[in-house]
Image (cartoon, rainbow, N blue to C red):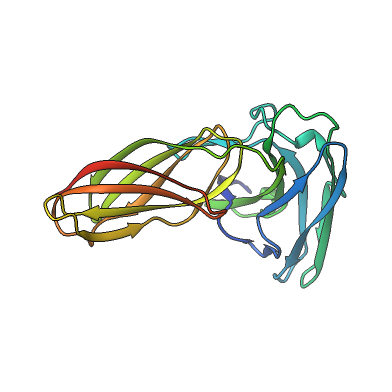
């Protein structure tokens, strides 16, 4: 008797350009400066680096998240969505081994936009046949991975859009490493790429003792994200600290805090 039991794991790829044998060549974030009423075009470049044909389905979704690391992909979950503006060149691809494919998309911006600043949605690229037909397999128990891309299409409107980042929380956690978790809330109108820097100062002399930083992460309007700053190299003690949210576009936001490194 042929019988198979499988556990399916769905993994979402944002941080790099590789799942299974498929790569997104030109990045997982595409940003466009737009004006009301215009039409623009872009492409997502794919390559199959494997040894067999990969069948992919392509569709649009909204995207939001919170500081706990939870991501939500549901149509209608984002008031700044541009999902209805985007038309994809195709919804299915059969990509042969060693071949490339350029997926075109078109963005038709409405004449009257409700907000200044950033609008976004994601193009989901998902393999549909990573797994063999269970009826063709001997009895087995296995774990199979199903991984999909979320390629962001971001549209920025208005040179006078407001940039504003709030520090929601900062908390020190001790484990194998000492990590300072800093939660940032984007209360402005613009999408940013941000690095959190923490400057430590001796409260008696005012001299800087250390400066450490997080990896750079993206942060969309009305969303909150947690940034982890490794403070293991900072000598134990009580400090006056300056927390900085340094944006790739040149904006900088900061706050003062008293931090005890134990």
Mark yes or no: residue 127 visible.
no
Q: Residue at x 26, y 41 (%)?
A: 257
Q: Is residue 90 left or right of residue 247?
A: right
Q: Which quadrant of the view contains residue 236?
A: bottom left
Q: Is residue 157 left or right of residue 89?
A: left
Q: Which quadrant of the view contains residue 206?
A: bottom left
> What is the x, y in percent for residue 80?
68, 32
Q: Residue 41 versus residue 255: which sits nearer the camera?
A: 255
Q: Residue 2 versus residue 103: which sits nearer the camera?
A: 103
Q: Which quadrant of the view contains residue 182?
A: top left
Q: How many marks?
A: 0
> What is the x, y in percent for residue 188?
56, 35
> What is the x, y in percent for residue 255?
34, 41
Q: Residue at x 84, y 33 (%)?
A: 110
> What is the x, y in percent for residue 120?
69, 40
Mark yes or no: residue 192 visible.
yes
Q: Residue 214 versus residue 158: which sits nearer the camera?
A: 158
Q: Residue at x 63, y 49 (%)?
A: 2
Q: Is residue 46 above or below residue 242?
A: below
Q: Is residue 107 left or right of residue 186?
A: right
Q: Residue at x 67, y 35 (%)?
A: 62
């Amino acid at each position: 008797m042929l019988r198979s039991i499988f556990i399916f794991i769905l993994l979402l790829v944002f941080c790099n350009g590789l799942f299974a044998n498929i790569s997104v060549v030109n990045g997982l974030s595409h940003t466009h400066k737009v004006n009301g009423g215009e039409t623009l075009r872009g492409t997502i470049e794919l390559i199959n680096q494997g040894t067999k044909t990969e069948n992919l389905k392509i569709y649009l979704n909204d995207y939001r998240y919170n500081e706990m690391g939870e991501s939500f992909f549901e149509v209608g979950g984002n008031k700044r969505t541009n999902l209805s503006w985007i038309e994809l060149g195709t919804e299915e691809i059969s990509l042969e081994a060693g071949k490339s494919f350029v997926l075109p998309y078109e963005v038709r911006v409405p004449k009257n936009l409700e907000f200044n600043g950033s609008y976004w949605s994601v193009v989901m690229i998902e393999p549909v046949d990573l797994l063999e037909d269970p009826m063709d397999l001997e009895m087995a128990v296995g774990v199979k991975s199903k991984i999909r891309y979320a390629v962001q299409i971001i549209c920025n409107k208005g040179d006078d859009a407001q940039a504003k980042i709030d520090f929601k929380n900062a908390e020190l956690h001790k484990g194998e490493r000492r990590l300072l978790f800093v939660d940032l809330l984007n209360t402005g109108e613009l999408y940013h790429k941000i690095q959190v820097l923490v400057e430590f100062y001796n409260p008696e002399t005012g001299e800087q003792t250390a400066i450490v930083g997080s990896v750079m992460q993206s942060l969309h309007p009305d969303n909150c994200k947690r940034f982890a700053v490794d403070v293991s190299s900072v000598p134990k003690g009580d400090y006056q600290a300056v927390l900085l949210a340094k944006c790739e576009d040149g904006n900088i936001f900061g706050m003062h805090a008293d931090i005890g490194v134990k």
